[in-house]
Image (cartoon, grey):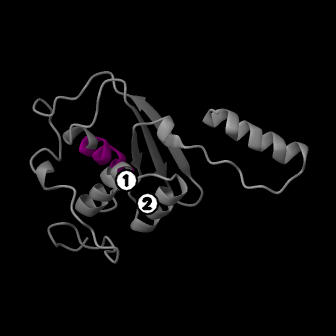
Amino acid sequence: MSEQLLFFATLVVKKLFNMKIKPYIPDFKFAFEHFCIHAGGRAVLDELEKNLQLSDWHMEPSRMTLYRFGNTSSSSLWYELAYTEAKGRMKRGDRIWQIAFGSGFKCNSAVWKALRTIDTSEERNPWIDEIHLFPVDVPKNHLGLVNYIGFPF
């Protein structure tokens, strides 16, 4: 059954029978190959990884952006996209979901579709000079308060 149909069926059952059931959370990995989630902090990334049932591979661009650049606000999404491109993961036709959060209850998202496969040798990219060093293992107790060079933010 498709993700949309499962979501709709859950919604109908809940409304028609006034049942208290959890809403169906679609498997977004069927819709998107890549995720760029605002790297506002480790706790945000951990919760989204858990609730969207994403893998370490899907979360890698966000976690490495937080590790290398810290919380750069909305620009973190573009560093994450650049990370994915520098790793050579972006292929023609791939779909990317960018999810950003602001203060309070603000949330925004955008969906992109790659028009071409990225040739990493031809691209200007903020990661390209040391992409071979990533990913790094970030200990669970790492709070993201010190960047990868060791300078405090």
- Closest to the observer, 147 or 24: 24
Task: Mark 2: give few (<14), some (14-19) or many (20+) Cα within 10 Å.
Answer: some
Q: Along the horizontal axis of the image, is 78 left or right of 132?
A: right
Main SS class of the magenta portion in the image? helix
Position of residue 17 measured from the top left corner of the image (x, y, whole percent): 90, 47
User: What residue did someone put label 1 on?
Assistant: 59
Residue 78 drawn in magenta: yes
Position of residue 57 measured from the top left corner of the image (x, y, whole percent): 33, 50
Q: CA distance from mark 2 to mark 1?
A: 8 Å
Please, which residue is most extreme toward the bottom here? 141
Q: Amino acid at mark 1?
A: Met
**Residue 51 occupies which quadrant of the picture?**
bottom right
User: What residue did someone put label 2 on?
Assistant: 45
Q: Amino acid at mark 2?
A: Leu
Circle nearer the viewer, 2 or 1: 1
What segment carries the magenta color?
Answer: 74-83
- Closest to the observer, 133 or 78: 133
Q: Residue at x 50, y 62 (%)?
A: 47
